[in-house]
Image (tube, grey):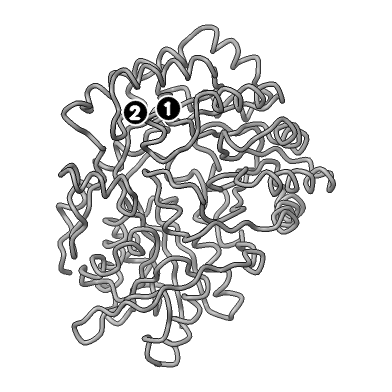
Amino acid sequence: MRVCLVQPNIEASITVKRSYPPLGLGYLATVLKNNNVDVTLLDAQALNMSEQQMEQYFIEQKFDIIGITSTTWQLAGAIKCCQISKKVNSNTLTLMGGVHPTFYPKETLGFNDIDIIVRGEGEITLQELISQIDKKLPLNDINGIAFKHNGEIIITSNRQPIEDLDSIPFPDRNLFKKDYYKCYTTVVRQKPCFSIVSSRGCHFKCNFCSSPDFWQKQRLRSPKNIVDEIEMLVNNLGAKEIMFVVDTFNATLEHAKELCQEIIDRKLKISWRTNARVYPIDEELVKLMKRAGCWLVYYGVENGNPEMMKKIGKAITPEKVIRAFDITEKAGIRTFAYFIIGLPGETEQSIKETIALQKKIHPDFMVYGKPMIFPGTRLYEIAVSQGIASPVADGQYYTVPYYITKEMTEEVMDKYIKSVFKNHYLNPSYIFKRAMRIRSFTELLSTVESALPSIMPSVKNPFDGGRWLRGNIDTKKTSINKTS
């Protein structure tokens, strides 16, 4: 039985396409490979594969099962992949997993060319599913799936999350064409650069994020297991930089400190970047991070108004933000600040408070984005109740809209975003400071690439993928019907 796991193509910039390999599919493919399944991983997005190329590939390879991952904005490409598969061979089984089908299995199965949904974490579910299919046994007793049977949609019991993430094998990097991936959307200091998933889930409850509900609970890999993978990448693949793909690196201070100490104890010469939260954090942690090779931290600041922070479920204060950036800067680590303009309750006054906070923390990098309404989030529920977004429907595409109200229009948000972007990145003192901090030719090149949108408006901003992704999905959905 031949299986192909697919990352569908989307029409976006090459920065978005080739930033990071799809490690989620890498984990699944590795587990199947270790269980003697003939599996191939196809990243149609990185390859920028056309529909004609995909059709020819499926004709040549003759797969028995095609499994596609899909977020909401990948849905059009994922459905097209299923349609191509069925066109080539109607007997090929099509599976779909990922965030969107997990939250909306019934609605996703409304598309005729999808046979089975894998809901949530897929390592165990996919093994059981392929085994049952191979043996031609019923699927009803497999937890974590949804499928069609005699005109009905069957949704089985939820799959419990994998408690011991150390039990999952490292993704086989030979499954990826490493030359296709840059491993950054902002800047990188060293190459080769690789990404690592160090945890799953998040115990915080920001209303614009679906991670807590998708992963069900937060689980951490052990520091030893994480550093074993880093060491393998350094020794076997020559890794010089790591990006931790994690919701919150410092979700627990103890774990974060142990991880840093493990890197230090093994004397690994590796630079790395990570996402983190401004609280909990302390001077001991950032000093350990610096000693362990961390050079850049991405902080989700979001807003500068305390009441707004409470409304979006992010229980941090401006004081905590200022302290986190201060101690990180003093430790010699660069900072990247994420801000969101336009969440429920936003006013022009609260936007001005956010800009004032941004000026106080003086991040090395920053980006302001507009809130996108993703199904599976509380923001989506709010938007549907207010008539700003439409409910996900059976067999219908959902275009990811921005959260826009009469009081906070897209024009108002764009005005502030363009202003702060130019004032920050085109400020002579910032340019001088940034130039003085560049430590490698690789960092110089990636800095220039990231800065181009500020200097040349015609160059797409790699920080704001949502706008053109949304537009391309709008275009695609008109050409893809519910039926094959």
Q: Residue furthest top?
A: 428
Residue in view at x 32 percent, y 36 percent: 371
Question: Is residue 387 shown left or right of residue 194?
Answer: left
Residue 88 in the image, given as x and y percentages of width and height: 28, 74
Question: Is residue 176 shown left or right of residue 135?
Answer: right
Indicate which disc, 1 or 2, sits on the residue closer to the N terminus.
Answer: 1
Residue 306 got which mark? 1
Measure the C-alpha gap from mark 1 to mark 2.
14 Å
Residue in view at x 56 percent, y 68 percent: 162
Q: Residue 119 falls in which quadrant of the image?
A: bottom left
Q: Three-letter amino acid code at disc 2?
A: Ile
Residue 341 got which mark? 2
Question: For this rendering, which residue is in front, 245 or 309?
Answer: 309
Residue in view at x 73 percent, y 48 percent: 259
Q: Residue 296 falls in which quadrant of the image?
A: top right
Question: For this rendering, which residue is in front, 3 or 214?
Answer: 214
Question: Is residue 476 shown left or right of residue 453?
Answer: left
Q: Quadrant of the C terminus?
A: bottom left
Residue 118 in the image, given as x and y percentages of width and height: 39, 71
